[in-house]
Structures are given as structure tokens and as C-alpha cells.
Image (tube, helix red, strand yellow):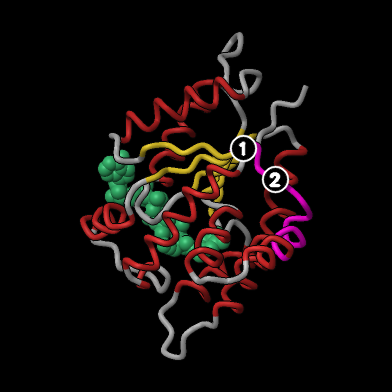
Amino acid sequence: MSVARFIVLEGVEGAGKTTQIRLLSSWLDALGVEYVTAREPGGTEVGEAIRGLLLAHREEGVPDEAELLLMLAARAAFVRRVVRPALEAGRVVLADRFDLSTFAYQGYGRGLDLDAVARMNAFATGGLRPDAELVLDLPASAGAARQAQEGSEADRIENEGTGFLERVREGYRELAAERADAHLIDALDTPEGVQRRLRELLSGLFPETFAVREGS
Ligand code: Z5A
């Protein structure tokens, strides 16, 4: 039986996705599980170039439809160059964002038609779905405060303001309630508490992948 799993971390900025992927990586190292990590948009040469286009501040603005298509172009490369090859090689993929981000940001945040987003996303992914989507949930203002404390400059999308980011958060909560593979996790807990919850969840969902092996 294949132990390859496609696991996606989701949530508003500052929810702790990067932190949790780092802690999950240490866990997988200890378990002796082979894995790759990657972020979206990004993860490939073309995806990182698109990321630069999308996140830079632009005087002229980026039409919402163009933003959606650029996200999906990056995803088409990500699926074919990173995710599928890793899964075929039997590796776990830990992704920092995937298509739930598109529904939350471009759908709920920007107000683009969700059915149109779904159709175009299905074309970009070729129908590939994550095995689990772990949605780190916290108020957008709390995520922004963490980022501010860190001193990192807000990118073009983070700069959209509280109303936009709260719609995104509500989008995540609604989508997580609808999708069988999505799990909402309280991200206001400590990093260690959130990590404990993620490990419990993954070991329970996929014991054949996330369990201690003989000799590891
Ligand atoms: N986007 C989109 O619109 N549509 C799409 O389809 C896709 C993406 C795929 C990419 O940004 C942008 O693209 C994003 C959505 C959009 N824009 N926005 N907003 P990104 O994913 O690269 O970056 P981000 O999510 O906005 O921010 P981030 O820095 O990567 O956040 P994070 O990974 O969730 O958080 P972190 O780096 O782990 O932690 C942030 C800080 O909080 C740091 O100082 C930590 O030490 C601290 N932290 C972490 N966890 C905790 C806990 N539990 N308690 C207290 N403090 C904590």
C-alpha cells in the first residue's frame, strides 16, 4: 500500500502554516518518512516567478480575473512538476496552501464566481485533490498582528485590509464545513499545542503513513 499523502496547510496570513510545516517536517524526519515541502504560489521556477508578479505592489493594480489566472497557472506547474512526481515516488507532500486558498481569497475575498473558480481550478489541477486540508483558523486581525510583530512588510494581497481578510477567514470556515477532507484547527493555541493536534489528526487519519516504523 502506498504511504504517499498530499497534505495541505491552509489559513489566513500569520495563521502559522510555515511554523507548523517546519514542526511536521521534524516529526517526519524522526518517523523516517520521506517527504517534500513546497509553497503556493511557488514551488517551481515558473511558480516562483508568478509569485513575484502577484505579490509585488503595483500602481496600476491587478484585475481580479488576472490574479485568479496567475494563481492557477502557478498551480498547473506545481501539480505537474512537484506534487504528482513526489506522490508517484511514494513521498508525502506538505504544501503551504493549495486550492482552498483560491476559493477563500479569489472567491470569498474578491467575490469571483465560485463555480467559475471551481471549473478553472479543476482544469489547472487535472482533478488532483489533497488527502487532507488542515485549516489553521484565527481572526484575520490576530494573523496580521503576528505579522506586524514579526516586522515583515505586508505584500500586495495582505495590504487589502481587514474587511477583505475577514471575508477570506469566513470563506475558509464555510469551505472547511463543506469539504470532507478539510479540518478546522484552532490556531490561537500555542505552536506546540497546534502541532500536537495536527500530529494526532494525521496519525488518526493515515496510520499507515504517520506511524513509527521498525528501525526508525
Ligand atoms: N494566495 C491567493 O490569494 N490565492 C491562492 O490561490 C494562493 C495564495 C495559493 C501568499 O502568501 C499569498 O498568496 C497570500 C494568499 C495568496 N496572501 N495573503 N494574505 P504566503 O502563503 O506566502 O504568506 P502568508 O500566508 O500570507 O503569510 P505567512 O507568513 O506565510 O504566514 P504563516 O505561514 O501562516 O505564518 P508563520 O510564518 O508560521 O507565522 C507568522 C508569525 O506568527 C511568526 O512570527 C510566528 O513565529 C508567529 N506564530 C506562528 N504560530 C504562532 C502561534 N501559534 N502563536 C503565536 N505566534 C505564532
Q: Residue at x 59, y 10 (%)?
A: 215
Location of residue 30 with respect to 117 vertically, above or below: above
Q: Quadrant of the N terminus?
A: top right
Location of residue 214 with respect to 150 vertically, above or below: above
The answer to whether residue 41 is seen in the rendering is: no
Viewer-nearest residue: 207 or 172: 172
Q: Quadrant of ligand 1?
A: bottom left
Determine which residue is flagged by label 2. 129
Q: Amino acid at mark 1?
A: Asp
Viewer-nearest residue: 156 or 150: 156
In terms of secondary structure, where does tag 2 sit? loop
Residue 169 image position (x, y, % from top left): 42, 55
Residue 164 image position (x, y, % from top left): 39, 68
Determine which residue is flagged by label 1. 181
The answer to whether residue 83 is left or right of residue 169 is right
Q: Residue at x 35, y 40 (%)?
A: 187
Q: Magenta span covers which residues?
A: 120-132
